[in-house]
Amino acid sequence: MKVLYLNGPNLNMLGVREPSIYGTLSLADIEQKVKKKASQSGIEVEFRQSNHEGVLVDWIQQALGQFDAIVLNAGAYTHTSVAIRDAIKGTGIPTVEIHLSNVFSREDFRHKSYLSPVCIGVICGFGAESYSLALDAIANFKKK
């Protein structure tokens, strides 16, 4: 199984940007932990990050036929991007939406996700562990 991890705007700043909310691990640190766990399960993972909405849309579309699932931390685009939503829906690739923080305990605008209705599930509030939990969720989903 191949899983594509896509990360949106500002996630390249993990470990530096508001560590009290997003933690002290960098995206590279998280990637390393997920890749170790994935290799133990025989799952291949690839991580990508972009601050640009169109690049994320392109990657979702290009994943068709290349990846079995997507884990998506779209950052702020979660709450604004119909384009990313349509790309997920259009490809039909099982996608898990993740967030480091509990978006429901934060500002009201973060409570609305354009992506959740087209994803197989949402994981939020577990910090960097959200990335690993998504891997477990996909493995279990694919067994069905």
Image (cartoon, helix red, strand yellow):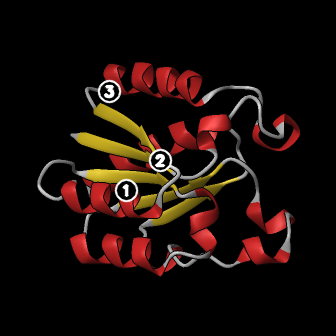
| Residue kind at label 2, given as amino acid type | Ser
Q: Which residue is mark 1?
A: 55
User: What residue do we see at 15% from left, 48% from top?
Assistant: 66
Q: Nearer the viewer, residue 4 or 83?
A: 83
| Residue kind at label 1, given as amino acid type | Val
Picture coordinates of residue 89, whole percent (x, y): 32, 77
Q: Mark yes or no: residue 84 visible.
A: yes
Disc sitting over residue 41 in the figure: 3
Q: Quadrant of residue 108?
A: bottom right
Tell me the SS state at disc 1. Answer: helix
| Residue kind at label 3, given as amino acid type | Ser
Q: Quick check: 107 above or below 33?
A: below
User: What residue do we see at 49% from left, 27% from top?
Assistant: 31
User: What residue do we see at 58% from left, 52% from top?
Assistant: 9
Contact, CB < 8 Å: mark 2 with mark 3? no
In space, the residues marked 1 and 3 are separated at their CA atoms by 29 Å
Q: Which residue is mark 2?
A: 50
